[in-house]
Amino acid sequence: MTSLYDRHRAVIPDWVALYYKEPVEITHGEGRHVWDADGNRYLDFFGGILTTMTAHALPEVTKAVSEQAGRIVHSSTLYLNRPMVELAERIATLSGIPDARVFFTTSGTEANDTALLLATGYRRSNQVLAMRNSYHGRSFSAVGITGNRGWSPTSLSPLQTLYVHGGVRTRGPYAQLSDAQFIEACVADLEDILGQTRGSVAALIAEPIQGVGGFTSPPDGLYAAFREVLSRHGILWIADEVQTGWGRTGEHFWGWQAHADSGPPDMLTFAKGIGNGMSIGGVVASAEVMNSLDANSISTFGGSPVTMAAGIANLSYLLEHDLQGNARRVGGLLIERLRAIGAGIAAVREVRGRGLMIGIELVKPGTDEANPQAASAVLEAAREGGLLIGKGGGHNTSVLRIAPPLSLTVSEAEEGAEILEQALYNV
């Protein structure tokens, strides 16, 4: 019999990556655990790339999806849609953006693509600022602003992108500076770039914590300092909250709130966790920016009644059970436990993160050189131990990415840390 892996390779593009030497077929899940086709049970520390935000098979979400599917599955944005309006109202209020409007898409890629369309149209400019080591999706425009060569398959783009320092605190020319000096240097770099542009710049798009880049982040306040410069030039700030939104960082509901001294962003994009696995993305912007399009537009699948019902149920569960607080408490314990483990392992360069968004950067012992082979080996060893994690990083994919569902318990955090400890010591 032909294996599922062989069938996959026969019909799916080679560039669709699979984890593990022997790829896993996940068949079902419950809570923070999933099972594969061979019956093996895993503690899930990656949540389908930060997407299973609350829990696998959360009864409140599955019930909402089932009930809505029994009424109507699809209608499009050409008709009034009660679940879409209800979820938009809640997100607009939570966003912190005054007079907010919400447009739903089906993914984070599409959300960022929409934000770029809005910004370039509003500002009448195709010049965009992005952060080095960044990732914003796989569409043509999103790839055009990606600052991570591992995820940028073409240099062709409809946009002129200029890359700014600041997304990575512990590597690069400013790594040895204090936090205050780091911010000052990055602001000077931004000013220098703006002095070299021709005409207006549309926007700066930035992840408060870089996801695919290996959960790197600047000191708190960097984007607030950037915002002061941007505002003088009329340049919009787009906060890419696809991975940092909904309380995952523990300390804040949105990643931009760590940089709030200069107010909220002009736009924020979201996706992943809000749907708990259902395809929801979107853009929040002020009415002035959102309503600036001067052509017709709709979304066939954005705002689907079924996905909106899932989003409402998922968001309600998250808020009612204070999963942001749980991410802060359990994530704080987990990151300290992992730092204690890493302190005794020469291959661990840094354990970083916030809440339940944690990265472990691996290097060749005794050097500062990235070690992607070690990252792959730990990924395999963790799976053998019953734990699923991710990997990423702009320096040759040498960062282990840890982002469990936000309902993770203390005992599950300790279990995962023990498996990781064993995997790290064996590499």
Image (cartoon, rainbow, N blue to C red):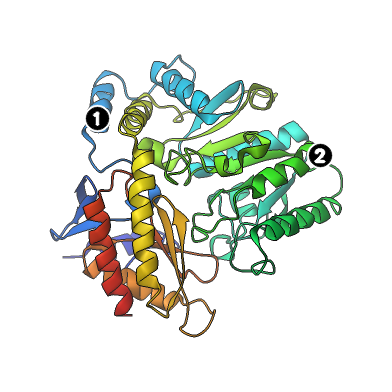
| Disc 1: which residue | 60
Residue 47 relative to residue 152: left or right: left
The answer to whether residue 139 is visible is yes
Say if 386 sits above or below 124 in the image.
below
Q: Where is 307 relative to 81, above or below? A: below
In the image, 51 versus 248, the foreground residue is 248
- Quick one: label 2, few (<14), some, or many (20+) residues within 10 Å? few
Residue 204: x and y, percent? Answer: 69, 45
On the rendered structure, is 270 left or right of 379? right
What percent of the width, then of the height, locates residue 247?
A: 43, 40
Between the C-alphas of marks 1 and 2, the distance is 46 Å
Left/right placement of residue 277 relative to residue 360 reads left
Residue at mark 2? 233
Quarter of image, res 278: top left
Q: Whole-percent x and y of residue 136?
A: 56, 50
Q: Quarter-wise, where is residue 186 in the image?
A: bottom right
Q: Residue at x 48, y 20 (%)?
A: 89
Type of amino acid at the residue the image marks with label 2: His
Foreground pick, 110 / 379: 379
Question: CB under 8 Å between callouts 1 and 2?
Answer: no
Q: Residue furthest bottom?
A: 366
